[in-house]
């Protein structure tokens, strides 16, 4: 029969001690099992079973498992055909699961990368329906606009006259260019299924119902940095005319090869121009500086 020697001191300590020191706690047939291995199995089982038992109680099951493992090895059960077949099938199932996860991950990465490389000009018609409001009325109103669009109504006209987003009415519902990771994923998924010129059915959000239209699809230029020369206009039309004439002369000099930064320092109304050399911060598409 097997000899088992135990270091009793480990039976009386808390689990935190196991993670701090690597000490042998069990020896079976000259094979030593460390406190770190015990700690790993203890935590793993506690997580799987969603319960906690004391280290002392779990130690009994740990020893019993190692005894059975030693006996199985002594009987060479790991060389039996049934075991080898089952073990190979298990490894194959793990491999297939890992490969499937990898395929899904790679697919999502590819989708995200493709979307980040595209910029889409989008317009929206919004019918407000905050929590507590009559959402049925709001949906019927949004659906009536959707049906009108299907019959050939102008999206820009409906966005101007029927949309309830007051900020976008003057812009005919246009929010400018968007790219991946700029909108909630459920809206992004809808927008990236639409082709140029197509519009969506009404989509529910916390704000209300929205109909989206993709006006244009182009390449995302990425982050950009530009320099500028600015003249601030006021209320005096005569002074404004003089400023415009000055800008036209500056533009003419730039086209003829004059140094942009020197002209900016001489003529720009931007007081920071000397420090920044007329450059604005890096910005992305549709970002307000």
Image: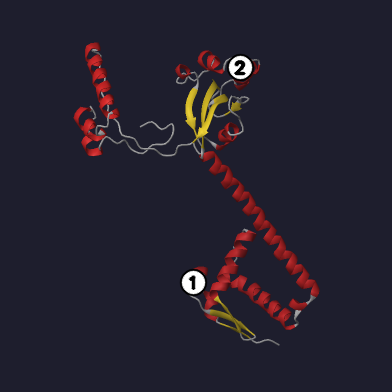
Q: Quadrant of the C terminus?
A: top left
Q: How is the image coloured?
A: secondary structure
Label 2–label 1 contact, CB within 8 A: no
Residue under the image location 74 percent in, 77 percent down: 78
Q: Which residue is mark 2?
A: 145
| 144 vs 285: above or below | above
The mark closer to the camera, 2 or 1, is: 2
Q: Quadrant of the N terminus?
A: bottom right
Relative to 53, 74 lies left or right: right
- Disc 2 or 1, which lies upstream in sequence? 1
User: Residue 189 got which mark?
Assistant: none
On the image, the x and y values in percent for residue 265 come to 21, 32
On the image, the x and y values in percent for residue 186 come to 58, 35
Residue under the image location 52 percent in, 69 percent down: 15
On the image, the x and y values in percent for residue 63 come to 64, 77
| 99 vs 208: above or below | below
Q: Which residue is mark 1?
A: 17
Relative to 84, 132 lies left or right: left
Around disc 2, counting alpha carbons within 10 Å, would you say few (fewer than 14), some (14 to 19), or many (20 or more)?
many
Question: For numbered disc 1, what is the local secondary structure?
Answer: helix
Question: For numbered disc 2, what is the local secondary structure?
Answer: helix
């Amino acid at each position: 029969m097997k000899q088992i020697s135990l270091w009793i001191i480990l039976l009386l300590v808390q689990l935190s001690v196991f993670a701090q020191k690597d000490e042998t706690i069990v020896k079976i047939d000259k094979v030593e099992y460390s406190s770190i291995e015990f700690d790993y199995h203890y935590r793993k089982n506690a997580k799987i079973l969603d319960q906690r038992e004391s280290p002392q109680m779990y130690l009994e099951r740990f020893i019993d498992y190692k005894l059975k493992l030693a006996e199985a090895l002594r009987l060479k059960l790991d060389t039996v055909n049934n075991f080898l077949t089952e073990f190979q099938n298990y490894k194959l199932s793990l491999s297939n699961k890992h490969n499937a996860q990898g395929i899904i991950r790679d697919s999502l990465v590819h989708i995200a990368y493709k979307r980040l490389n595209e910029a889409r000009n989008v317009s929206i018609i919004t019918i407000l329906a905050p929590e507590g409001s009559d959402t049925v009325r709001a949906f019927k109103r949004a659906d009536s606009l959707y049906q009108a669009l299907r019959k050939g109504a102008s999206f820009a006209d409906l966005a101007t006259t029927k949309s309830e987003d007051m900020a976008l009415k003057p812009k005919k519902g246009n929010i400018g260019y968007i790219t991946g990771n700029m909108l909630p994923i459920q809206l992004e998924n809808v927008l990236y299924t639409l082709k140029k010129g197509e519009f969506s059915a009404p989509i529910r959000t916390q704000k209300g119902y929205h109909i989206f239209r993709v006006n244009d699809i182009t390449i995302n230029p990425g982050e950009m940095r530009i320099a500028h020369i600015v003249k601030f206009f006021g209320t005096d039309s005569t002074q404004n005319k003089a400023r415009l004439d000055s800008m036209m002369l500056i533009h003419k000099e730039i086209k003829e090869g004059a140094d942009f930064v020197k002209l900016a320092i001489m003529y720009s109304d931007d007081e920071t121009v000397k420090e920044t050399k007329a450059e604005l911060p890096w910005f992305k598409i549709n970002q307000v500086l």
